[in-house]
Amino acid sequence: MVIAATEQKQTRASSIYLLLRNDILNGAMLPGTKLNIRDLCEHYSSGLSPMREALNRLSAEGLAQQLDNRGFKVQPVSVPELMDLTQARCWVNEICVRKSVEKGDGDWEESVLLTCHRLSRTPRDLAEGDSRPNPDWVTAHKAFHQALISACGSNWMIDTCSQLFDAAERYRNLARVAGVSRSDPRDEHQEIMNAAVNRQADLVVELLNSHFERTAHLVRSVVSQTEADAE
């Protein structure tokens, strides 16, 4: 009975963590927003213990910031962090994608092809005029980028790419909430996919870096305004 109760508590904490994490990533909770634990418990129908555990996990991920004896707030954003994040994505993804192009087998090629096709068939927006991202597109987008590096042979590197992707997703969604959205990147994804399955490692790296940097350039103006508003 004790084990069952403990597992139920852990499951509830994980559920709250995922809900809160998703709201931070998709821009429902803006950078710098104070996270009052009791208000959050009411909003998410949670107890204090699961909520504190969720906030501690988010703090460890860099999505929330713990204040000295004053609770938590959503991690602020900044142009220097955006540039650092973009550079880190370029560096880490280059290592992983080169290894995947070198070592990937037929299953890897099929995964890259299928995830790219699924992404191209998934609408980016929930509805016209709705700034919220389509969660199915977000899932398909990440699946494609993770498929590209899935044959690199290092789970640590794959997990790092996943974490960097999520951090970048928060910046992308911040821009969407502000009404700034880049043109449909479908052609870019198709070009990246073609280069990958044709084993053109240098071209994949070039296209990926341009893909990341183009998004960062678009988001930068929104982040600058967010920083100014926070001062």
Image: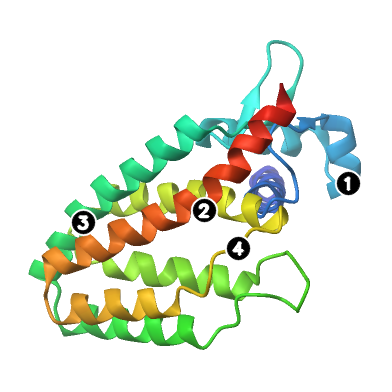
Which comes sooner in the sequence, label 4 or label 2? Answer: 4
Residue to which mark 4 is pinned? 181
- Mark 3 Cα-neighbour bin, 10 Å: few <14, some 14–19, many ≥20: many
Q: What's the amino acid at mark 1?
A: His
Image point 40% across, 40% down: which residue?
85
Please tell me which residue is depicted at 66% across the width and 54% down the height of the picture. Answer: 22
The amino acid beneath tag 4 is Ser
- Report, in whole angstroms, how far the alpha carbon at label 1 lies from the one at label 4: 29 Å
Which residue position is annotated with label 3? 96
Does residue 10 sit above or below 78 in this rendering?
A: below
**Mark 1 vs 4, N-terminal side:** 1
Number of labels in the image equals 4
Q: Marks 1 and 3, how far apart in space?
A: 40 Å
Q: Which residue is mark 2?
A: 218
Q: CA distance from mark 3 to mark 2?
A: 25 Å
Q: Tell us which disc is closer to us: 1 or 4.
A: 4
> Is residue 210 shown left or right of residue 217?
left
Which element is circle 1 on? helix
- Give me the disc on residue 43: 1
Is 132 left, or right, of 213 in this rendering?
Answer: right
As rendered, which of 190 and 107 lies closer to the eye? Answer: 190
- Please identify the quarter of the rendering in which residue 57 is found: top right
Residue 216 spot, x, y in % from top left: 46, 50
Can you tell which of label 1 and label 3 is closer to the viewer? 3
Q: Earlier in the sequence, mark 4 or mark 3?
A: 3
Which mark is nearer the camera, 4 or 3?
4
Image quadrant of residue 148?
bottom left
Tell me which numbered mark, 1 or 3, is placed earlier along the sequence: 1
